[in-house]
Amino acid sequence: MPRPGLRTLIRRTLTTALIATATLATPAVAAPAPGQAATPPGRINWSACTDTEFEGMQCGTLQVPVDYARPRAGSLSLALVRRPADDQAHRQGTLLLNDGAGGSSIEQLRLAMRIGFPAFAGAMSRDFDLVAVDPRGVGHSTPIRCTTPLRPAGITHFPRNQQQFDTLVAHNRSFAANCLRENGPLIAHTDLTSTARDFEAVRSGLGEKQLNWYGIHYSTLLGRTYADLYPGRLRTMVLDTALDDTTTPAERIRREAATAEEAFNRFTRWCAASTDCALHGKDAAAEYDTLVARADRTPIPTADGSRTLTGEDIRTATQDYLTLSGVTWPALAQAVVEAQAGDASDFTYEPDDTLDAVQVQVPACLDTARPVTTFNQLTRLRSDLARISPHLGGAVRSWSALTGCLGWPIPARPVTAVTPVHGAPPALIVQSTHQALAPHSAGFAMAAQLPGSVVLSREGDDYSMFLLSQCVRDATNRYLTTRALPAPGTTCTD
């Protein structure tokens, strides 16, 4: 019998953990009916979702300007799904659900429904309308689509000489030119500020005086940006796995690399202790390093023969395998074993299949200052990462964003971290003590920007902690309904 695919394994494991029943159909989100009258600007066009997984929900579209400085120069469509509060008589407002950069919030909601989300969400689904909005350029909203590959064979994000560096820069320019041809001015307007303005249009279209915000990873920065631009428009903010943009871009890469390396080391210690690890009884770190070195010498094919993977490909895929210890750690160990046997297919899968790599990369080139422009500068930073991260070599998301933006023709427009953000509510910031995407300290850096906020630590290695921890669910629902925060220094251990 063939072993289950990675996405099936993730869904199955989460379902078991939450004692819920999964629904497996995947029809598309409903679109407006053909010939339906155009909706006036600023109005959300709602209709009943035809998608069986969104039964009883409303699917909507909202037109917003591509460029808010030139609102009549063109528009794009935002896609929304609204799940009405179970207890409409005691409804407390709307909670916006926000996935990370390049991730579809609508597809995240779909996954949540598959694992029985309303059965364990408590007050979140009982007292609040849940609204998932795909950000501009992402998913079911007007999406960014580019036909030039993001990183084709022969392009390395770890160039070892000037020629490889020049080839990378030339490819990035070609990729950007293709994206501009395919998508027009949208490519220059997927930055944090433009996206935050979209959410103000959503608030107005919903007719809400205030919104409640649930943001994960990148969307913690988006929520903070929205709160800064529109004081008083948020009632609550729940920020899961906050990012820290108060340091320099180069320092952020170093910290992320150190965090991912620590997560990898925890993974290998788990392998040594657990028979659930396919590498149990072996030196997991040595097995991984040997595999990476082998793939760098002779790339390893996928089962279907469609591509071969280098050691760089394997290292780049590893960080996202470290984000959910009970789910993706076993999958990572199995992926190593399969690749050792000659099939590297599992390292081509994105554990979070709601993400689109192109839709991650394009906003990154607008939102992050570019601290590196030359091969010598990149080499110095890479040397730091090799020391900090001997197994992963610094192959983390922020490194891919940096190297993928070398030569990018559109200037970056990063948002400057503000301390304090006036008019923001005290936030509940939920941060794992060990996480491959963001250090524990990032939660406190975010809290310092939002007066009165509290970091609720969760002992462990995971994000999306509302799904995994009853302690986090209880604290989150208490905060959403009463705005009461846990005592500073509180840690969840379940």
Image: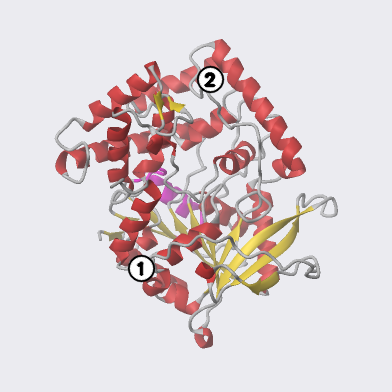
Magenta stretch: give its range: 435-453
Residue bearing the label numbered 1: 21
Residue 61 in the image, given as x and y percentages of width and height: 69, 64
Whether residue 184 is visible, yes or no, is yes
- Structural crowding at the residue carrying mark 1, measured as other residues with C-alpha within 10 Å and reported as few (<14), some (14–19) or many (≥20): some
Which disc, if any, is residue 154? 2
Residue 37 in the image, given as x and y percentages of width and height: 81, 70
Magenta-drawn stretch contains 338: no
- Find residue 300 and report its image quarter: top left
Query: Which quadrant of the rendered structure holds the C terminus?
Result: bottom left
Residue 21 in the image, given as x and y percentages of width and height: 35, 68
Q: Is residue 433 above or below residue 52?
A: above
Q: Earlier in the sequence, mark 2 or mark 1?
A: 1
Q: What is the three-letter code of the residue carrying label 1? A: Thr
Q: Is residue 176 above or below residue 45?
A: above
**Outermost residue toward the bottom in this view:** 89
Residue 289 as seen in the image, left or right of residue 148: left
Please report the residue visible at 65 percent of the width from the left and 25 percent of the height from the top: 407
